[in-house]
Amino acid sequence: MKRHTAREKALQALFQIDVGGIEPHEAVANVIEEETDPFMEMLVFGVVEHQKEIDDLLRQHLEKWTLERVANVDRSILRMAVFEMKYMDDIPLSVSMDEAIELAKVFGDEKSSRFINGVLAKIKETLS
């Protein structure tokens, strides 16, 4: 599975976990068509494992928003991107940002990609 596709599947699983309260293993099983992908699993389980730290970082960089008010899909995209940016040293920050913006264009509304870009740009400054 290509990494872009793995990110799409991870986003779908994270959305199920966030909105439906589904267990991570079940959410992963729901989105895979064949065999599972190690990168996708790393994203899903990494976000779940580090969600408190990720959410704390997001809250510090959201202006005039609470994390709970952010659209569910945007919140899942942000969490996944921040996990990549903070915990996956082999992926350049700009790649994680670009992928998140592309996911927002497909799965979010017309303002999602700009919103996600703005939040992630602020986080990138603190991680660089």
Image: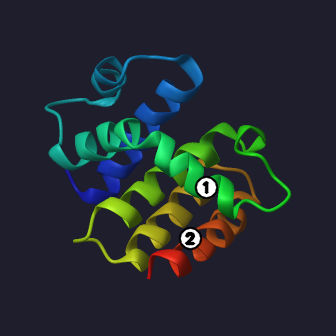
Q: Is residue 127 left or right of residue 106?
A: left
Q: Which of the marked residues, 1 or 2, is nearer the chain's N terminus?
A: 1
Crowd rating for badge 2 (residues with CA inside 10 Å; few <14, some 14–19, many 20+): many
Q: Nearer the viewer, residue 19 or 36?
A: 19
Q: Nearer the viewer, residue 76 or 6?
A: 76
**Disc ID at residue 84:** none
Tell me the SS state at disc 1: helix
* Percent of width and height locating residue 18: 54, 28
Which amino acid type corresponds to the residue marked 1 in the rendered image?
Leu
Q: Name the residue carrying label 1.
A: 58
* Percent of width and height locating residue 46: 32, 43
Q: Name the residue carrying label 2.
A: 123
Task: Name the quadrant of the C terminus.
Answer: bottom left
CB under 8 Å between discs 1 and 2: yes
Q: Residue at x 21, y 50 (%)?
A: 39
Q: Tell me where residue 78 sits by quadrant.
A: bottom right
Q: Residue at x 50, y 41 (%)?
A: 52
Tell me the SS state at disc 2: helix
In the rendered image, the vertical position of residue 35 relative to residue 124, given as above or below = above
Q: Nearer the viewer, residue 55 or 26?
A: 55
Q: Residue at x 34, y 29 (%)?
A: 31
* Percent of width and height locating residue 87: 32, 60
Q: Is residue 45 left or right of residue 97?
A: left
Q: Residue at x 49, y 26 (%)?
A: 16
Which amino acid type corresponds to the residue marked 2 in the rendered image?
Ile
In the rendered image, the vertical position of residue 25 relative to residue 39, given as above or below = above
Marks 1/2: CA–CA distance: 8 Å
Q: Is residue 61 left or right of residue 27?
A: right
Colour scheme: rainbow
Q: Is residue 24 left or right of residue 38?
A: right
